[in-house]
Image (tube, coloured by chain):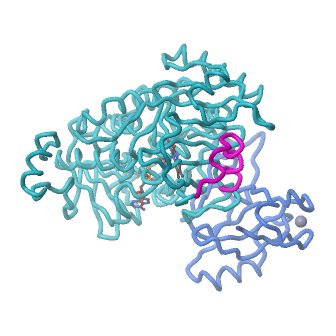
Amino acid sequence: MLILTCPCCGVMADETELSPGYEAHLKRFGPGSTPEEFEAYMFARKNPKGVHFERWRHTYGCGKWFLAARCTATLEVFGTYPAQVSEPPADIIARIQARRPDWKADWQPDGKAPK
Amino acid sequence: MKRYSVFAIAREAARYHMGWERAWASPEPRASYDAIIVGAGGHGLATAYYLGKNHGITNVAVVEKGWLGGGNTGRNTTIIRSNYLQDPSAAIYEKARSLYETLSQELNYNVMFSPRGLLMLGQTHHEVRGYLRTVHANALQGVQTEWISPQRVKELVPIINIDGPRYPVLGALYQARGGTARHDAVAWGYARACSAMGMHIIQNCEVQGVRSENGTVTGIDTSRGFIGCRKLGMVVAGHSGQLAEMAGFRLPIEAVALQALVSEPIKPCMDVVVMANTVHGYMSQSDKGEMVIGGGTDGFNNYTQRGSFHHIEETLRALVETFPMISRLKMLRQWGGIVDMTGDRSPLISKTPLANCFINCGWGTGGFKAIPGSGWAMAELMAKGEPGPLAEDFSMWRFKEGRFIDESVAAGVAH
Ligand SMILES: Cc1cc2nc3c(=O)[nH]c(=O)nc-3n(C[C@H](O)[C@H](O)[C@H](O)COP(=O)(O)OP(=O)(O)OC[C@H]3O[C@@H](n4cnc5c(N)ncnc54)[C@H](O)[C@@H]3O)c2cc1C
Ligand SMILES: [Zn+2]
């Protein structure tokens, strides 16, 4: 069972208390954007095997959205943080780099695969 | 390839079974091939088979990081049906189902296709309406299905409880020629036939990079070195996102875990497949007597082939309510696979931004039933460079164009 600490209310929440919201830090494209930009925002996904940043909702707790850094290959949790940021905070990045020295930050929300 | 037959069994019985040959060869990779398929699951092997059989392309390698059939093909609960709602889905799933009818004869390999009949229970009025709509759609598509009464359900499935407290059975969408097949045998049968055509099946060889020149694919880097190719087909289910990243593009896909479990073997008690999508569980009985059980996916990205326990609990709770007699059954084994889920729950059989690189994925929780049809369509796409009638609607650009093939509405659990 996945356990995440909700940064909004501080509760250590079991997976059954949470709803997954998939990829975090997406940059929104709406009216006026190109079809390519809209498609990249709306549908194209990073879906990495390894470090991932995602949205979660503490549905059966405080009800708030928050973000989590997790490894999809091992299910290790690196930490959770509030949703009101456009990129992961430095302490989360540091924790990931300590555990995954080869990992390269790639959360730029342009919808393109990192080169 | 020596043919399997009753005479072969008699011959081998007379000489202590010393004369059986290996079903497929394990050759060293060549420097390059006309076509390489990544992923020796059912879909990859079927693609290779129909490349040879329908298009005469046999200078082909199927490259597999583990052992063939060890991905979702060897982990699924083997339900075969074609009672989908949308026309493109009905076309490809019915093509696959009809190919399954004669696959054992065609491959000279017993895939144990068992068209024992399949019921999808209607347990809410909303669901009943949805299935009635599917029955009408299927009639127009030439797919044989019917809507049957709760009493008929009870006749077909004596162990079912049709007046459960929460969700009584209000009827069922019945496909008499749906059923199951032996999953490993499907992979093995195609592999044997591919090997007999001179194709190379290269196991324990992980693809680690895709090389290209001027926007055209030239080959793959693998754990056993570079292998060149003129055409590349990526057929890796849960790992499609990774392969796409190697080739420089992204897919509308998330990889999540789906679990299944089997009980201890019991005497024959249910000779049809029953799916209960409202409560999220389905069940059939294997030839060995085990009850084969599955449910819904986990909700988050996961590559570990391990799912969350509470989903098993939910599935079993639903099935115990529907089949009270299984409440005392012991479960023997439980496992997970990584399924590739698209937004509209329909697959991609598509060209990609990289020229001569093609992708077949997104079958998610329900691609075993599609293997022959999918291989047929993918082979045509790879051979001609353009999709044929079965594949054309499944392009990866349908999301940009807003042409979804919406099957998530048609069936909550899409096996
Ligand atoms: C628990 C469960 C139950 C299911 N039940 C049903 C059902 O009842 N009916 C149904 O129709 N469908 C069902 N499915 C879905 C079905 O199993 C899949 O859709 C189907 O098997 C996919 O086949 P495939 O050949 O595309 O993928 P796979 O069989 O997964 O094959 C892909 C192969 O690619 C290989 N690969 C991955 N990455 C690389 C790499 N980098 N290099 C080389 N090789 C690589 C993998 O090792 C794997 O062998 C179920 C799935 C699961 C997990
Ligand atoms: Zn909370």
Residue B400 visible in image: no
- Of residues B257 and A112, the one drawn nearer to the viewer in this rendering: B257
The answer to whether one can see residue B403 in this image is: yes
The magenta segment: B312-330
Quadrant in which residue B305 is drawn: bottom right
Considering only vertical position in the picture, is B310 above or below B13?
below
Chain A: drawing colour: blue
Residue A6, position in %: x, y? 85, 69
Judging depth in this view, the residue of B161 and A104 nearest the camera is B161
* Chain that the image shows in cyan: B
- Which residue is found at the position 23% from the left and 57% from the top? B32
Observer-nearest residue: B166 or B177? B166
Give yes or no for residue B125 being in the magenta stretch: no
Compared to residue B191, the image places residue B414 above or below, namely: above
Relative placement, left or right, of B7 versus B298 is: left
- Does residue B216 lie above or below A93 as drawn? above
Instruction: Provide residue A103's location: percent of width, then percent of height.
Output: 59, 76
| Left or right, B318 with reference to B264 | right
Q: Position of residue B280 (x, y in %)?
A: 68, 43
